[in-house]
Amino acid sequence: MQQYKTLCEAKTAISKCRHCEPDLPLGAKPIFQLHKDAKILIAGQAPGRITHQSGIPFDDPSGKRLREWLQVDEHKFYDPQSFAILPMAFCYPGKAASGDAPPNPACANLWRQPVLNLLPNIELTLLIGNYAQQWHCPNERATTLTERVKHWKTQWPTQLALPHPSPRNNIWLKKNPWFESDILPRLRARVREILSSD
């Protein structure tokens, strides 16, 4: 595993990465947002097709809902000194039978820990979806996404498991109204607390 002295060095290397390109239907286009002073880390899955086209992370309906969950506008969300966006894979993985294909694990194996080592100011990590949760919480007793989200207090206030904000998860949100009533107010308060110290 390659180590980097500075985040700038790592970002340059990631931008040039073509390791998974043979497996990517639209080619390699690493998409991320990183700054050494970032306070909140968004650990997502992988860019979707819309995001691949624009080159802007969460530039899609999932991003709109995520910003609503956090109660932040686009200006603050895309401020890299506030939010680092580090998906489990940096490039669009293509389609699967239902939704997008899973992120290629080779990406996390190559990049994840070296980059995390260069983000010393993270106060809150948001784990969006199963892949991020399984990587960041390998010893977590909860085995399903719903269980991890429901037991949010086990990692609070430094880490929080979230469902994916994709419109595909509307059914999950309807089945689990406690997420919006119990967890989102605490998440929003925590985000305000962290960002107010900027």
Image: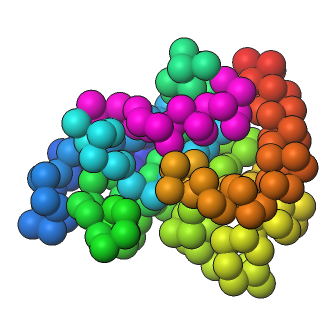
Residue at 67% x, 78% y: name it: 144
Q: 126 or 145, which lies in front?
A: 145
Residue 158 at x, y percent in the picture? 79, 51
Q: Is residue 143 visible?
A: yes
In the image, the segment drawn in magenta is 54-72
In the image, is 97 to the left or to the right of 37?
left
Q: Is residue 64 above or below residue 166?
A: above
Q: Is residue 65 above or below residue 126?
A: above
Quarter holding residue 149: bottom right
Q: 87 or 173, which lies in front?
A: 173
Quarter holding residue 19: bottom left
Residue at 51% x, 69% y: name it: 131
Q: Count up the numbered dots.
A: 0
For the N terminus, the quadrant is bottom left
Residue 96 among magenta residues: no
Q: 96 or 174, which lies in front?
A: 174
Residue 71 among magenta residues: yes
Q: Is residue 71 above or below residue 12?
A: above
For the C terminus, the quadrant is top right
In the image, is 185 to the left or to the right of 65?
right
Residue 155 at x, y percent in the picture? 82, 62
Quarter holding residue 112: bottom left
Residue at 12% x, 53% y: name it: 27
In the image, is 167 to the left or to the right of 196?
left
Residue 111 at x, y percent in the picture? 38, 59
Residue 23 at x, y percent in the picture? 15, 68
Q: Is residue 157 visible?
A: no
Residue at 61% x, 44% y: name it: 41
Q: Is residue 152 above or below residue 86?
A: below
In the image, is 42 to the left or to the right of 114?
right
